[in-house]
Image (cartoon, grey):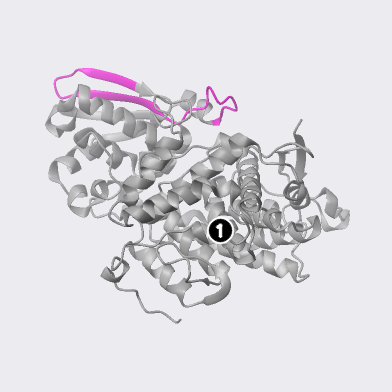
């Protein structure tokens, strides 16, 4: 049975023993040498392919180009690989984690887990992979490290809300990535404890990165958490210590950044000897948009097929999407962000605007990671007119289902109520995205492979696509030194079609 740890703020005079601190319990999970179950290993391979797919599609995007240029200014041997460049080109592992982390996150198109907090657990993969390549680890070592990263991030996300206090969700990623690297390297509990504390201390930031006019920094935030996790592990291995108790201290994270001095949380972690299976509770995206829009895109596509006239703003009086508190307040009209209704908004803002997303999906009957966000697409007059008629409203039942701990009941959809210009009312609802494990068309290995082939088409040579997929699907069997195969090279000349910006390096 899992263990529940009751976490609260302690005065300094109470002298909370290290072994009773949450960071220590997280470190104990990381050092528990349990084998990786077969279904977990299978899903890790799926998500590895998923990450690489969206990274390939983002290689020419400005944030990725800039991050890659920064990484390439830090060559190192043995080092780690950078997506888009050859496996022979190596950079310092923290910079590889940085560049690859930006590439994975840029399109907001990889896996997700939503509970008390938001998260993209696949963000753990770039820093763990970078350290694995640098240290000559095996595929089995890499699997164990990634399993730990997913487990700890999911467990923290279930228990501790960050967004309620306007703290960005990557504050759970820094500790989980540090723990995953610790597992990969076989470090002791004390060292991982110190790394977790340092990683948490350096990765707390406000949520303004996901508010208002959302900037290119959105892709960098998780990459920075991964980079800082690598650096935290390095310092901890050199005997350097962290603030403690980092969570429970009277001037710590909980007391001043989260629920305050009277707060308490129940954090559920695997018991000793219990496998780390949290990745199985996570889900990926079929569409390049905020996860809470996935099901609503599928519903809009369905309505496009059955009621195509609903894409005409002259035929629609209003569309109200009744949904969860989170969806309404983060990507809906409840956010009170005028930018979510602006044709001149950034792509990063548009993929966090459910009114925009539903308008385009209703009109096009599809969703594309580039075309659906093109400036000319967002500015189309009939789209703008329909977009302005779409609002969201919180529905307590959808909020309850959002937070349900029963996987069969947990849902991220909503109910769409459409009033036509002639007074007809159309009501349709959807609970889960089609690609969700309980959805209409759950993603399995074949869908992950197809996602990679689709997004890598024109970016990689056909032979390189096949080579990478073969290596990724053999990940559990890769021997020490073979992890350099877990990257890909862009087709000749492609990266040279964009100019690398000049900075300090």
x, y percent for residue 168: 53, 53
Circle 1 SS class: helix
Q: Quadrant of the N terminus?
A: top right
Front residue of 158/184: it is 184
Residue 179 image-quadrant placement: bottom right
Q: Is residue 107 visible?
A: no
Could one spot residue 481 in this view of the protein?
yes
Residue 462 horizontal/vertical position (percent):
32, 53
User: Residue 423 in magenta?
Assistant: yes
Which residue occupies 53% across, 40% down?
113
Q: Residue at x 59, y 47 (%)?
A: 476
The image shows residue 241, relative to residue 333, as above or below, that is below
Task: Between residue 313 and residue 469, name the one nearer to us.
Answer: 469
Residue in the image at 63% along x and 55% along y: 138
- The magenta region covers 403-428
Residue 488 coordinates in the image, percent (x, y): 42, 59
Decide: is 57 above or below 273: below
* Residue 432 belongs to magenta span: no
Q: Is residue 145 left or right of residue 100?
A: right
Residue drawn at the location 84% of the way across and 51% of the way down: 19
Circle 1 sits on which residue? 483
In the picture, residue 131 is in which quadrant?
bottom right
């Amino acid at each position: 049975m899992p263990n529940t740890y009751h976490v609260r703020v302690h005065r300094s005079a109470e002298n909370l023993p290290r072994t009773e601190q949450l960071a220590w319990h997280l470190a104990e999970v990381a050092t528990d040498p349990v084998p990786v179950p077969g279904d977990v290993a299978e899903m890790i391979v799926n998500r590895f392919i998923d990450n690489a797919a969206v990274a390939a599609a983002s290689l020419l995007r400005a944030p990725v180009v800039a991050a890659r240029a920064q990484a390439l200014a830090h060559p190192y041997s043995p080092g780690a690989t950078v997506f888009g460049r050859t496996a022979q080109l190596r950079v310092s592992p923290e910079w590889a984690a940085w560049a690859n982390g930006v590439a994975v996150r840029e399109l907001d198109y990889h896996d997700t887990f939503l509970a008390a907090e938001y998260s993209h657990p696949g963000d753990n993969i770039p820093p763990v992979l970078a350290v694995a390549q640098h240290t000559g680890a095996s595929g089995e070592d890499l699997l164990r490290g990634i399993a730990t990263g997913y487990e700890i991030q999911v467990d923290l996300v279930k228990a501790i809300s960050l967004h309620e206090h306007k703290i960005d969700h990557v504050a759970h990623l820094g500790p989980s990535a540090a723990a995953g690297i610790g597992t990969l390297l076989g470090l002791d509990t004390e060292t991982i404890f110190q790394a977790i504390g340092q990683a948490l201390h350096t990765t707390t930031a406000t949520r303004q990165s996901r508010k208002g006019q959302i900037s290119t920094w959105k892709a960098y935030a998780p990459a920075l958490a991964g980079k800082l996790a690598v650096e935290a592990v390095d310092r901890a291995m050199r005997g350097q210590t962290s603030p403690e108790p980092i969570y429970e201290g009277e001037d710590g994270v909980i007391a001043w950044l989260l629920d305050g001095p009277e707060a308490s949380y129940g954090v559920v972690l695997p018991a000793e000897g219990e496998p780390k299976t949290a990745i199985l509770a996570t889900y990926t995206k079929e569409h390049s948009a905020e996860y809470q829009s996935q099901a609503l895109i599928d519903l809009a596509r369905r309505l496009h097929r059955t009621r195509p006239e609903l894409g005409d703003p002259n035929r629609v009086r209003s569309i109200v999407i009744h949904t969860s508190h989170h969806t309404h307040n983060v990507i809906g009209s409840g956010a009170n962000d005028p930018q979510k209704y602006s044709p001149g908004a950034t792509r990063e803002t548009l993929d966090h605007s459910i009114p925009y997303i539903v308008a385009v999906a209703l009109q096009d009957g599809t969703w594309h990671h580039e075309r659906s966000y093109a400036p000319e697409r967002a500015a189309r007059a009939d789209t703008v007119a329909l977009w302005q008629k779409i609002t969201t409203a919180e529905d307590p039942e959808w909020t309850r289902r959002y937070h349900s701990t029963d996987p069969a009941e947990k849902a991220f959809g909503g109910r769409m109520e459409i009033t036509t210009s002639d007074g007809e009312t159309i009501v349709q609802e959807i609970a889960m995205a089609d690609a969700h494990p309980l959805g209409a068309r759950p993603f399995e290995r074949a869908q992950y492979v197809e996602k990679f082939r689709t997004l890598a088409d024109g970016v990689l040579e056909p032979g390189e696509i096949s080579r990478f997929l073969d290596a990724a699907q053999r990940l559990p069997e890769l021997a020490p030194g073979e992890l350099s195969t877990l990257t890909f090279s862009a087709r000749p000349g492609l990266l040279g079609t964009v100019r690398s910006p000049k900075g300090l390096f």
